[in-house]
């Protein structure tokens, strides 16, 4: 089991500095432009691909870092650069992790490289779970996948929403209901290969923040995919469904075990979102600190006022606390430690709330300038609002933490 460390090792530090250089030199100068354009920054993704920062190899390396700190470190630096562009770069990872977690070795080998493409022809991928009537309440999902045994094909119908890269992705990973009687235990994930007829992009959303990241509805009308596009394969699905039916019939404890396994997956992935929030918060704090030291009013730098200096002290304290929670949860996931207090959700809750607070304080410290698009804290504040919404809202994180601590079915 890796020792927990408050410091990155030498190799991690050099990777961090390399990502930081890209964030500083390539992402930062392009951030305002792509925010205004509200389009996927393909040239920046391509730049990242050219240096190996947008590749399966790089993310796999960070994902399997035994200390657990590879992913949070990567996320923090990229989102320090710019949240919208960073999400365009890491959004593919969400779909890739869906295949890595549930797919067979063959499925991983076939589909994950196609999600990234290569430096000359970059691609992105989308993970489509949320629906208009199934956001926090995943069990309300309606998109249906029906098996056509004669043709060994699955037929999917439904509408997904809020899909990052939805409709512009090469590969879409779609979660659908295969057995409506089993609630969320009757769901399965499917690969929709590039160019499959019946899949189309619905509405593209115009957003408050992270506007360089494409978010859209994905409509599935009689989408037919080969049997081997079911992640994990049919025998495994049949076995899982049979077990779920048996547990439903016989034992509440069994059903609880399945739920716990799903929760453990979320606990392991949520710290990555916490790290994104830490990146944005740190960026806004640094802007505010610099401004407070140089902006003069009443004949002295504004940081000479306790009212400003104390805000900065609080901002930095909360950012460091958020990072420590993120690192603890990431290390626990890598070490296989049980999340007995929902530490993953805790880290995401605290870091996302911190980012919203810190970016608002940064605007305050920059005064009128902070409120304009001439200064990046305005964009950072808009961007930060996403962290308390996706990958489970703050309310859902509190629900998970409270239920885990108390063992009670709190509503
Ligand atoms: C920019 C963006 C990108 C996204 N990317 C993806 C993606 O790539 N793939 C994907 O599948 N999804 C994605 N999502 C969807 C995201 O995960 C959902 O928006 C999120 O889960 C919340 O669901 P909802 O929007 O339907 O809100 P709702 O679930 O309708 O929630 C509305 C409000 O009610 C509160 N609430 C709901 N239930 C409870 C409860 N039991 N107790 C207390 N409060 C409650 C919520 O906290 C929230 O404040 C994305 C969303 C956005 C905005």
Image (tube, rainbow, N blue to C red):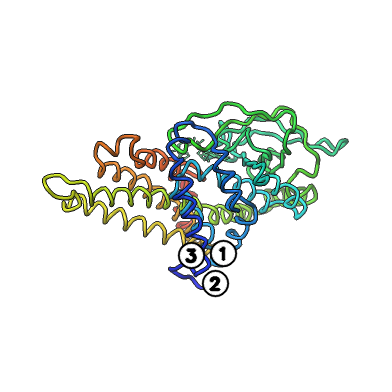
Mark 3: give few (<14), some (14-19) or many (20+) Cα within 10 Å. few
Nearer the observer, 395 or 204: 204
For residue 176, side relative to residue 152 (left or right)? left
The numbered mark, 1 or 3, whose residue comes first in the sequence reads: 3
Q: Residue at the spot x=44%, y=55% of the render?
A: 347
| Residue carrying label 1 | 334
Q: Residue at the spot x=42%, y=40% of the render?
A: 383
Q: In the picture shown, does residue 19 fall above or below 365?
A: below
Discs 1/3, front? 3
Nearer the observer, 385 or 408: 385
Residue lying furthest right: 150
Dot 1 beta carbon under 8 Å from ligand 1: no
Residue 341's spot in the image, x, y percent? 47, 60
Residue 327's spot in the image, x, y percent? 46, 61
Residue 117's spot in the image, x, y percent? 68, 45
Q: Give the SS element for disc 3.
A: helix
The numbered mark, 2 or 3, whose residue comes first in the sequence reads: 2
| Residue carrying label 2 | 2
Q: Give the SS element for disc 1.
A: helix
Q: Give the SS element for disc 2.
A: loop
- The Cα atoms of the two marked residues, 2 and 3, are separated by 17 Å
- The label number, if any, that marks residue 115 in the structure image: none
Nearer the observer, 73 or 53: 53
Nearer the observer, 399 or 21: 21
Contact (Cβ within 8 Å) of mark 1 with mark 2: yes
Q: Quadrant of the N terminus?
A: bottom right
Q: Residue at the spot x=71%, y=27% of the render?
A: 221
């Amino acid at each position: 089991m890796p020792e927990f460390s408050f410091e990155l090792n030498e190799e991690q530090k050099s990777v961090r500095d390399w990502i930081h250089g890209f964030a500083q030199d390539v992402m930062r100068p392009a951030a305002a432009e792509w925010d205004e354009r509200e389009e996927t920054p393909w040239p920046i993704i391509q730049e990242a691909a050219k240096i190996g920062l947008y590749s399966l190899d790089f993310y796999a390396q960070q994902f399997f870092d035994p200390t657990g700190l590879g992913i949070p470190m990567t996320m923090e630096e990229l989102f320090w650069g710019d949240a919208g562009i960073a999400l365009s770069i890491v959004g593919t990872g969400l779909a890739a992790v869906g295949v890595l977690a549930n797919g067979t070795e063959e499925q991983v080998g076939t589909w994950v490289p196609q999600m990234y493409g290569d430096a000359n022809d970059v691609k992105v991928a989308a993970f489509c779970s949320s629906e208009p009537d199934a956001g926090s309440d995943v069990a309300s999902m309606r998109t249906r996948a029906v098996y056509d045994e004669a043709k060994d094909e699955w037929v999917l119908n439904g509408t997904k929403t809020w899909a990052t890269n939805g409709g512009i992705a090469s590969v879409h990973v779609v979660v659908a209901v295969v057995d409506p009687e089993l609630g969320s235990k009757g769901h399965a994930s499917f690969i929709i290969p590039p160019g499959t007829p019946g899949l189309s992009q619905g509405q593209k959303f115009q957003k408050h923040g992270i506007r360089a990241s494409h978010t859209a509805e994905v409509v599935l009308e009689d989408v037919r995919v080969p049997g081997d596009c079911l992640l994990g394969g049919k025998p495994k699905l049949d076995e899982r469904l049979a077990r779920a039916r048996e547990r439903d019939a016989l034992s509440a404890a069994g059903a609880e075990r399945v739920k716990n396994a799903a929760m453990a997956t979320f606990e392991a992935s949520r710290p990555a979102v916490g790290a994104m929030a830490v990146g944005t918060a740190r960026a806004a704090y640094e802007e505010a600190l610099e401004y407070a030291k140089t902006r003069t009013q009443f004949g002295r730098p504004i940081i000479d006022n306790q009212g400003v200096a104390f805000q900065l002290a609080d901002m930095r304290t909360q950012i460091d606390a958020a990072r420590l929670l993120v690192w603890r949860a990431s290390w626990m996931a890598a070490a296989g430690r049980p999340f007995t207090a929902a530490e993953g959700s805790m880290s995401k809750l605290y870091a996302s709330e911190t980012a919203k607070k810190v970016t608002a304080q940064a605007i305050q410290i920059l005064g009128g300038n902070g409120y304009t698009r001439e200064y990046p804290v305005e964009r950072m504040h808009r961007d930060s609002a996403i962290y308390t919404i996706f990958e489970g809202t703050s309310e859902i994180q509190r629900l998970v933490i409270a239920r885990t601590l108390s063992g009670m079915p709190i509503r």
